[in-house]
Amino acid sequence: MSKLTGKVAIVTGASKGIGADIAKGLAKEGASVVVNYASSKEGADKVVAEITKAGGKAVAVQGDVAKEADVNRIFAETKKSFGKLDVLVNNAGVYQFAPIEEVSTELFSRLFNTNVLGTLLASREAVKLFGEDGGSIINIGSAATEINVPTSSVYTATKGAVDSITAVLSKELGPKKVRVNSINPGMVETEGVHTAGFIGTDFQKNFEAQTPLGRIGQVGDITPLAVFLASSDSGWLTGETLVASGGLR
């Protein structure tokens, strides 16, 4: 039997990148997966198609986690489709770097509403849907909180908040058998990183030069950690932050 047979998982921001790979990884281990997306229906439908073609179960559900009504709908659709929830992966996130002179209320609100408020709202609804056996919340933080990259003050602040949310909720929800852990990736090659123009630049080379394992990450480096945290293999772990950065600190 696969590690997640009979489980139901929501992965937010799962139309591409780390989220898409995690969704496919959870499904491969037997979970039925809700593939959430904010704007890329095409990407989410492609992830669902790959999962179902491989014999898994998945549905795509639109929703912007920064909007309370959308979050409520994501969880209502999950209950309608699968009847329960066992795993939530808070992966949806946005990032933008800016020097302090360019920090604005708009930048702050956009990043905090998705990365922090979205994590809180989704976690709130997950707790309502988890059964008597509890569940697993997996937050996708960032090694930025270890590295403190110049010009990332707002983004790193959001991920510092995610670290704190992980620690607090692990204690708050432990009595309900809900485990809360975080995966904090370093630089990972995704569509978003390509779009941002980081690949092949001095920025990437600088990261690799400082990384003990000598390379940036791939999505396949992160997914096995999510499968582990979603499964009973990690049943005695909560409040943990796994820094998946190739050793970069």
Image: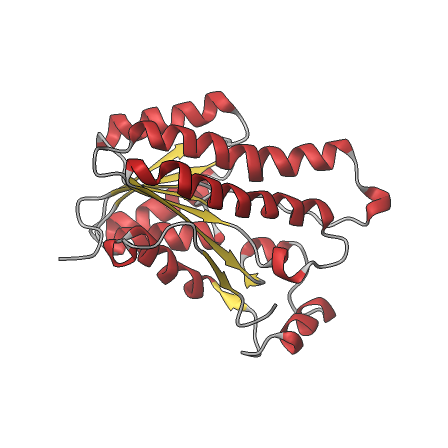
Q: In the displayed structure, would residue 65 be above or below residue 45?
A: above
Percent x, y for residue 241?
47, 56
Q: In the shown orientation, is residue 163 left or right of residue 195? A: left
The C terminus lies in quadrant = bottom right
Residue 82 in which image quadrant: top left
The residue nearer to you, when weighing 111 against 43, is: 111
* Residue at image location 57% in from the left, 40% down from the top: 115
Q: In the displayed structure, would residue 118 be above or below residue 203?
A: above
Any part of residue 73 in sight: yes
- Name the colouring of the figure: secondary structure
Any part of residue 63 in sight: no
Percent x, y for residue 8?
26, 41
Q: In the displayed structure, would residue 59 be above or below residue 151?
A: above
* Residue at image location 77% in from the left, 53% down from the top: 151
- Residue reaching furthest to the left: 1
* Residue at image location 64% in from the left, 39% down from the top: 111
The residue nearer to you, when weighing 143 against 238, is: 238
Percent x, y for residue 109?
68, 32
The N terminus lies in quadrant = bottom left
How many marks do you count on the picture? 0
Percent x, y for residue 76?
33, 24
- Residue reaching furthest to the top: 69
